[in-house]
Amino acid sequence: MSPRILLVDDDRSLCEWLEGALVRRGFGVQSRSSAESALALCAAEDFDAIVADLNLSGMTGLELCQRTAGSRPDLPVVVITAFGSLETAIAAIRAGAYDFVTKPFEIDALCLTLERAVEHGALRREVKRLRSALQETRRFEDLLGASPAMGALYDLVDRVAETTASVLISGESGTGKELVARAIHQRSPRSGGPFVAINCAAMPDALLESELFGHVKGAFTDARSTRNGLFLEADKGSVFLDEIGELPLSLQPKLLRALQERKVRPVGGEREIPFDARLITATNVDLETAVAGHRFREDLFYRINVVHVPVPPLRERGPDVLLLAQHFLERYAVALGRPVTALTPEAAEKLAAYAWPGNVRELQNCIERAVALTRFDRIMAEDLPERIRAYPPSRALASGAGPADVLPLHEVELHYIRWAVDVLGGNRTLAAQKLGVDRKTLYRKLQLVDPPAPVHPVRLPRDRGL
């Protein structure tokens, strides 16, 4: 849509000339001859920017800037001032004007200023929307997201938290599996007890056995005193075993027996000690494949996998990318003492197009780096890592295709919509939710591809897990 400009000038001839010139350059323009009537129109309709002469009769352009900045800070005002009245123009900037141009001016210069003003206003509105979304989105402890994929995860966490069943959380590295485990614990009847976590891949076998089950004094060198293991430390609470797929085969029978008997035998001990802790495990590998390859015991797999909780990768969470980016931006702006408030549209576009193989952890690292390096109050595209700036969106659509296979963008969109509906079993309501459009828009676009015709071979983003 064309940017909507409100032109305010009591010089009728200049107003008509400006209106015609701006319309010819693609702007939608309405004009008013007084600041009072302009404010009344702004209250009734939406505009992307205001162009106002400072020397208006009645309410001045300076007062218009002050009133607009107070009621609509996301609506930029560009003021026009006569040459020689720069002090007044500076006063307008201090009153909240976005920029000023001096008479006589080139229309192209005014258009460039307006384009920047429109972008600035859109950015402020997007920041406001994201902050509102951050406040309104469903939060499960430290989990954050408003996508359908996260909604399904929240519902599953709510249901499993009420039980005492063992839970296996699966997901790619960096998706936040430990956050999900903590959310299950915090929403469970055991929330008053301890949450004890350990990474099974981070310790040698002998030390891991002692950490899990404890040891008695003299059981091995340096065992100068008896020590409880994590299962006993987590009494009335939860034990979280991360990267359970890396648990050594030699320890798997002992863990299985402990879960079956609800007792542990410390290293070097002669008796078993009962424990009362819920087990939550997580893995970023396919345990069924590990079972088939004899790297993980099948009986232990079924014991820990009473309830399976899959965590979606970031690439399947759609608008959550920018929601999380704004969340991390605000966190690191405070932590690093930087006056950074938002992403530019170009930076947001790069973040949204990227595949995020490192998931939320990679996004968090990216935003922390950008906040630390940017020289402005906004994160620019050039502040992002090279791999994100250079990521080709076409990789998702036409990987391996030749020049003859390149399609018009609208044709790719239409066939992607048809593909999405087919993948979702013909459920158009769900397809609209996944694609981020309303149902009427989806139905209208589907009419353009009905019946679907054969097209050039295009690899649709099945590879990206969508």
Image (cartoon, helix red, strand yellow):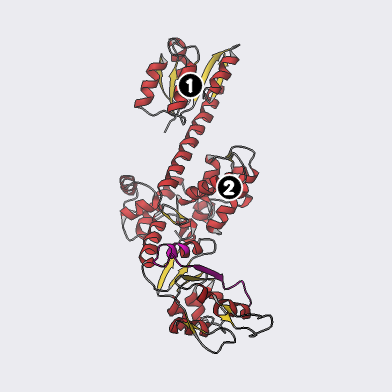
Type of residue at label 2?
A: Tyr
**Earlier along the polypeptide chain: callout 1 or callout 2?**
1
- Confirm whether the magenta stretch covers residue 190: yes
Q: What's the CA distance linking mark 1 and mark 2?
A: 32 Å
The residue lying at 33 percent from left, 49 percent from top is 446
Q: What stretch is highlighted in magenta?
A: 182-204
Q: Which mark is residue 65?
A: 1
Q: As drawn, is 348 to the left or to the right of 305?
A: right
The residue lying at 50 percent from left, 86 percent from top is 272
Q: Nearer the viewer, residue 270 or 70?
A: 270
- Confirm whether the magenta stretch covers residue 342: no
Judged from the image, the secondary structure of the residue bearing numbered disc 1 is: helix
The residue lying at 49 percent from left, 35 percent from top is 124
**Residue 133 found in image quarter:** top left
51 is higher (above) or lower (below) than 281: above
307 is higher (above) or lower (below) than 139: below
1 vs 2, front mark: 2
Can residue 453 be seen at all in this image of the molecule? no
Type of residue at label 1?
A: Cys
Would you name the residue on which mark 2 appears? 332
Seen as rendered, the residue at the extreme front is 225
74 is higher (above) or lower (below) than 95: below
Please provide percent x and percent y for residue 171. 49, 65
Can residue 310 be seen at all in this image of the molecule? yes
